[in-house]
Image: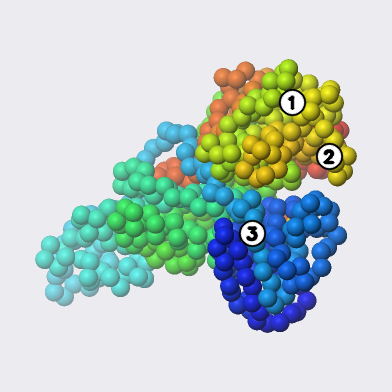
Amino acid sequence: MKFHSYPEVYKIKIIVNGIEKEQLIETNVNLLDILNNLGIRIEAICGGKGKCGKCKVILENPDSASPITSEEKRLLSQDEISIGMRLGCLIEPKDGISIIIPDSSLQKDQRILSEGISTKFNFDPAIKSIGIKLPRPKLGGDESFLDYIKKELKREINIDYLSLKRITDELNYETLEANLVVFNNEIIGFKKNEEKIYGIAVDIGTTTVVTYLIDIETGALVDIESILNPQIKYGEDVISRITYSLNKGVSIPHNSIVDGINTMIKKLCDRNRINSSSIYEMTAVGNTAMHHIFLNINPRSLSVSPFTPVVSKNLDIKARDIGIEINPSGNIHVLPVISGFVGADTVGVLLATGLYKNDEISLAIDIGTNGELVLGNKEKMVSCSCAAGPALEGGHLGFGMRASTGAIESVFIDKDSFDTFYKTINKSKPRGFCGSGIIDIVAEMLKVGIIDSSGKIIENGNDRIRKNKTNNHKEFVVEWKEKTDIDTDIVITASDIREIQLAKGAIMTGINILLEKMKISADKIENLYLAGAFGNYIDIKNAIRIGLIPNIPLERIKPVGNAAGEGAKISLMSNEKRIEENILIKKIDYIELASENNFNEEFVKSLRFP
Ligand code: FES
């Protein structure tokens, strides 16, 4: 959000964790952007649109900022406003502004899922090291060293220019031996005898990015590094990032993700004492927006119907062309996308689960802000993207938060007293609830009768069920103020329940429409693969209880962890699977749910709890 101009240089005082910091600021952006530029990360689930109410800061001197807006009055309580609380994304700072950032607004370390399922495949990486010994050239011969190499390899081969320049240094003139590093039909480097060669597989999630370092000659996983996606400062969800790219240029979020990946590469190299030039390939997966932004492709076409991706087939790009700091002649292999909203991460899930090769019917679900679904088998596959919204990840909920320290991750409610028993991440005092916690709370509320199948909260005189003093809406107290880390009662409100209904309704509508397209009922699903962090941490019985996933025998439901990342690893290590990537995307029919005749009817049906 941008404001009209104000002094080009002004002073800002920021108090964070009790430490004061004074800065001169030269930009005319809002306070949230200023904090981001200073590396102070605060919660901003709506990406600075003034909608989520998470970016809370306290103004020490109310006159040093633009007046409070109507959105802030709506999103903040009277108590909060009385202590000078404001929303960072809606503040236009003035010279001399002084702010306190409450601990509850700071982004906490986030739990990142890096493990996936292990799948069998033929180990046959696209990058190979090949030892050669050339015949000694003869005086008067008309062949070059490159000709001798081609003869020795018995095939046509090209050479990357940077490698061409190094041939005379790398070829042992005594023995005429060299170790070539080859990608497809191109020499991209030379390896010393004692050196190892590596590859990295990167899963570019909207929220987190995970990088796997792999010994490309043995397939051994050497190390893993992960970060929060640094593009979060440009919006927490895909739509915000696309909008940001349209307004301010794709190169800003593009550079941000490239820098983030380079930081991880440096850490992996330092920790394992390897030179980044011995990494010869990177494979990457991500949803279609992350895919386009990583490639520095303007994602404009993803923002308007029919949401056509600029490119769908897999791509190979020189590392030096995209700024990834591995060997500059190394290859960046980006997996293909299926549609504007079903991306390369889903292709990764398919490679990892083998759904596209199964005889039996399987359903893969990757739940995030968008739920991506693929249903089918080796004969036929259908896919869709469901606009689940951020509720299942904690967004749009009063006390929703990411899966980080203090998030309630599992809950049990006593059926008589309605007392709650719960587990938090890192066993800290509770600060809110993350996705798995929300599903448990709603399922437990249904089981003990605090809500009915329409989602209505039923009062029964228990003091945990009450009406909110400000808006008179009903809410359930999950934990009392004294026992929380945020000095306020943690509650789940009627509107939170509604958000969960909308999210789970969107997913179940997608599943039902795909089942209908395949002309089968849910009991024909033999494998239900739950991908991603969400699928790994949820209580499956509770997910069935709230109607988020179909009620099929539990043994058929398989959390597959970070299957998208696993797919990137498989693509790094198997040429055969890499060829299959492009074939499998052609076998999938993408269904645009909103254009289905029965979409509204299905959606309304799916809103109810079973
Ligand atoms: S309200 Fe400020 S980031 Fe959402």
259 vs 247, left or right, is left
**x, y (%) of residue 398?**
74, 44
**x, y (%) of residue 367?**
64, 39
Sequence order check, earlier mark of 2 and 1: 1
- Considering every residue shown, the one lying at the far bottom of the view is 8
- Please state the total of marks drawn on the protein image: 3
Question: Going 54% across and 53% down the picture, which residue do you hit?
Answer: 228
**Is 341 drawn above or below residue 65 in the view shown?**
above
Label 1 secondary element: helix
Q: CA distance from mark 1 to mark 3?
A: 34 Å
Q: Nearer the viewer, residue 606 or 332?
A: 606
Mark in front: 1 vs 3: 3
Picture quarter with ligand 1: bottom right
The amino acid type, in three-letter code, at marker 2 is Asn
How dense is the environment of label 2, judged by Cα within 10 Å: few (below 14), some, or many (20 and up)? few
The amino acid type, in three-letter code, at marker 3 is Ile
Label 3 secondary element: strand
Find disc 3 in the rendering and name its residue. 101
Q: Which mark is residue 468?
A: 2
Q: Report the colour scheme.
A: rainbow
The amino acid type, in three-letter code, at marker 1 is Met
Q: Quadrant of residue 519?
A: top right
Question: Going 47% across and 38% down the picture, which residue do you hit?
Answer: 115
Quarter of the rendering occupied by the C terminus? top right
**x, y (%) of residue 143?**
23, 70
Label 2 secondary element: loop
Q: Nearer the viewer, residue 456 or 164?
A: 456
Answer whether residue 448 is visible to the viewer in this image: yes
Find disc 1 in the rendering and name its residue. 445
Sequence order check, earlier mark of 2 and 3: 3
How dense is the environment of label 3, judged by Cα within 10 Å: few (below 14), some, or many (20 and up)? many
